[in-house]
Amino acid sequence: MTLLDLKPGQRACIQGWTTVEPPLRLMELGLLPGTDIEFVRFAPLGDPIDIKVRGYHLSIRKTEAALIRIERP
Amino acid sequence: MAESTSRPTRKIALIGNPNVGKTTVFNLLTGMRQKVGNYPGVTVERKVGRIVGDLDIDLIDLPGSYSLSPKSLDERIAYDVLIGHLPGETAPDLAVCVVDASNLERNLYLVTQVIDVGLPVIVALNMTDAAEEAGLSIDVKALEESLGVPVIPMVASRNDGIGKLKYRMRQEELPEPAERKWELMPVVAEVIPDLEEELKSHLPEKSRFIEALQCLTSDTMLESWLTRAPRFHARVLAVRERLEERKAPYRQAEIMGRYNWLSPLVARVAIKQKDPNQQTVSDRIDAVLTHRIFGPLLFGLVLLLIFQAVFTWATPVMDGIEAGVVGLGDLVRSGMPPSMFTDLLVDGVITGVGNVVVFLPQILLLFFFLGLMEDTGYMARSAFIMDRVMHRVGLSGGSVVPMLSSFACAIPGIMAARTLANPRDRLITIMVAPLMSCSARLPVYTLFIAAFLPTGAVLGIFTFQGIAMFSMYLLGTVMAFIAAFVLRRFVFKGESSFFAMELPPYRMPRFRQIIWRMIDRSKAFVVRAGKIIFGMSVLLWVLATFPRSNTPDEMIAERATIDLQIDTRADSLQAAGMTASNALIEAQVAMNGAIRTLDARESAYQIERSVIGRMGHAIEPIMRPLGFDWKISAGIISAFAAREVIISALATLYSVGDIDDDSPLLREKLKADRYADGSPVYTPLVAVSLLVFFVLALQCMSTLAIARRETNSWKWPAVMWLYMTGLAWLFSFVIYQGGKALGLG
């Protein structure tokens, strides 16, 4: 299950990545395995998305969201 | 620093994530004593301010960065300055890290990296009010102890804590550099000492660890050692290979190590008193402003309102300035003997200065609104809303800010593109940014829209002219998108860009900051544009005045005839009982129309044979199909120095030789201009054709110069000029010829 499988408003915990070379920039911004993450909403035109992680809002594209493996509590 | 001073100086670097109030802190610390330049060899802005006191401090404002592992040019510079790698730039004595208290974990990530550089560090814990609002209570003492560096809580926007920070920065005793407390995963940690050993003869001990770590993960960092320390370079490559064989995630090791140490630390020092998942005010605002339907609608409305305001609110002030300039010209003319010098002073100098000043109200307003968007956090939302569109044409939401900045001026816009980590995104953004209608085009739009398009309201508050103005901006924007798409599709092929952008909480705008920045940016514009416009105004007067031609015989004869008629009439009036002088004046008044027509024809004759007239005539054959006569063509030539120059060019072209200053406003003169057959030179169709030409053509030397600097070659500015000017010609051609075919001429 990836971040994209969540519905807006749902929360989950990051488990890892669906790729062997995860984007380092996202990791530096705090998206690491074990981090809680909330899918807040889609942008008006459907892409990117607004996520909440470590207490702040971050906007990433759906292609990147699909790289993030999550598990629902 | 070049400043000579007998007092001791200390060099301090200011660093922090974007959106943490770093610039506010910098401004409060240094006041107006700021110098802006560039780092040698690169184009990143180097901003230094001086804090004067017993101990002078040179404070360097580093570009906002999330990390010191360089992913963009800005972050590379930040790291290089801190570690003292830049030529001619010694390492700072101290680093002040501005940190957002409401967002500790991500902010402290950068702090741990700065600590590892080996410098003494002070943490400026900013926005403690926002943290409180979010229900966070921060144990400053515990944070200080855990990090091993002094922490100063503050609210920079309210000027709280700045004094304390300044005091700490001045203290003679610098804080001890902190020890590194986080751990790399063992498999990576064990290879580092070997690499550090290789750097022994190149770097001081304290900064070897972070350099070795950077080189292990970053190819660009490693490359710089290829010639300096080939053994180190080879060693890193060997170590990488070994780690890859063992499937060790060494590229992620640093990030995981730091966060593994930080997460429990932050949980300990920042106690959450409210449910962190509770909706904040900012969240509720976002629910509306980034709503599926209201979001884009409001964004469009905001843009439309800005341009409407810029167009209408500035008008009374501009009219006042215009009248003042004309008045001053008249005053000078009446107080000085008529001579070529007086002409130069009035038609060249005063008109030139006036042409700079008159558009300042609009420029200030535009910068004010852009500042407002930045300061409230709405700028990031505009990128969030627009990213889908931007991405589709090959840009990213991150290009929205450089592109929106280009509405003010392409120079800061092109420079803002440096924040894009992806070089391809950056180059495309640079290439299309000049298509966004900059404030220099605004005067041209204003003049021609006000003079030639109908007035009248649509939908109550929107005027037809306001909508026409909006259309100009829309056309430029749409063309920028198309150009970006074409560039991405055919010139810069390859995979698409990466995008991760913070959406900072909404904030009440701090007007002091906004106005500060507005004045700062406008000043730069006036100085840069003002010099060129002023110089061009004088040069143009010269080009329009020389070479002098002899008045043709038939005009001399005509003038003689008029003089004779005046004399005859005066004689007959005198015979009817008037005094000689009154009779002469009466006679002259009666012939006024004839004299004025002759004067205008004489000056037209002069200008047509001047240098600028000849140049205009030379390109008229190319410009005729667009509906432009030789005067417009001459104006366009002079506008290549800077777009707004066409105003002063036309003003000079139309006022030279105009003794009787009957119609001071340029727009009235333009309206009155006629071809030899009596048809008007400027029809609304010609005005539209000219407007479109100005939307699309690259008529700005400064833009070409900055593009040359940013891309480090003449190739891209050349391509830029050719494609934009080509587009301009094509569009104006289609519009003018199409309009004529439809009977709109």
Image: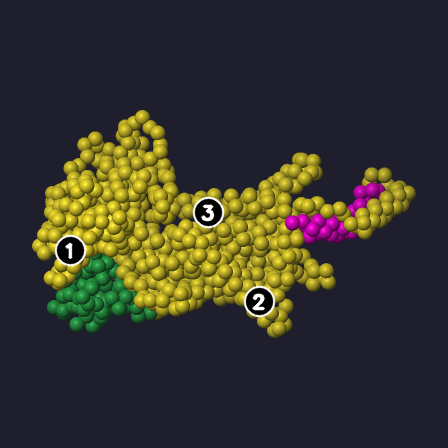
Chain of the residue under the numbered disc 1 shown in the image: B
Q: Which residue is mark 1?
A: B239
Residue B43 appearing in the image: yes
Residue type beneath disc 3:
Phe
Give the alpha-carbon distance from disc 3 to disc 1, as whole Å.
Answer: 51 Å
Q: Position of residue B92 (x, y in %)?
A: 25, 39
The picture quadrant where one finds residue B282 is bottom left
Say whether marks 3 and 2 touch (CB < 8 Å): no
Chain of the residue under the numbered disc 3 shown in the image: B
The span shown in magenta is: B583-611
Is residue B610 located in the magenta-colored stretch of the structure?
yes
Residue located at (76% from left, 47% from top): B551
Give the colour chain B carries in the figure. Answer: yellow
Give the alpha-carbon distance from disc 3 to disc 2, as whole Å.
Answer: 32 Å
- Tag shown at residue B375: none
Q: Position of residue B35 (x, y in %)?
A: 37, 39
Chain of the residue under the numbered disc 2 shown in the image: B
What residue occupies the far right of the structure in this picture? B575
Q: Which residue is mark 2?
A: B733
Above or below, comparing residue A24 to residue B179 in the picture: below
Residue type beneath disc 2:
Phe
Q: Is B180 displayed left or right of B362 in the figure?
A: left
Q: Position of residue B129 (x, y in %)?
A: 23, 48
Q: Earlier in the sequence, mark 1 or mark 2?
A: 1
Give the colour chain A carries in the figure. Answer: green
Q: Quadrant of the N terminus of chain B?
A: top left
Q: Quadrant of the C terminus of chain B?
A: bottom right
Q: Which residue is mark 3?
A: B525
Mark 3 Cα-neighbour bin, 10 Å: few <14, some 14–19, many ≥20: many
Q: Main secondary structure of the magenta part?
A: helix
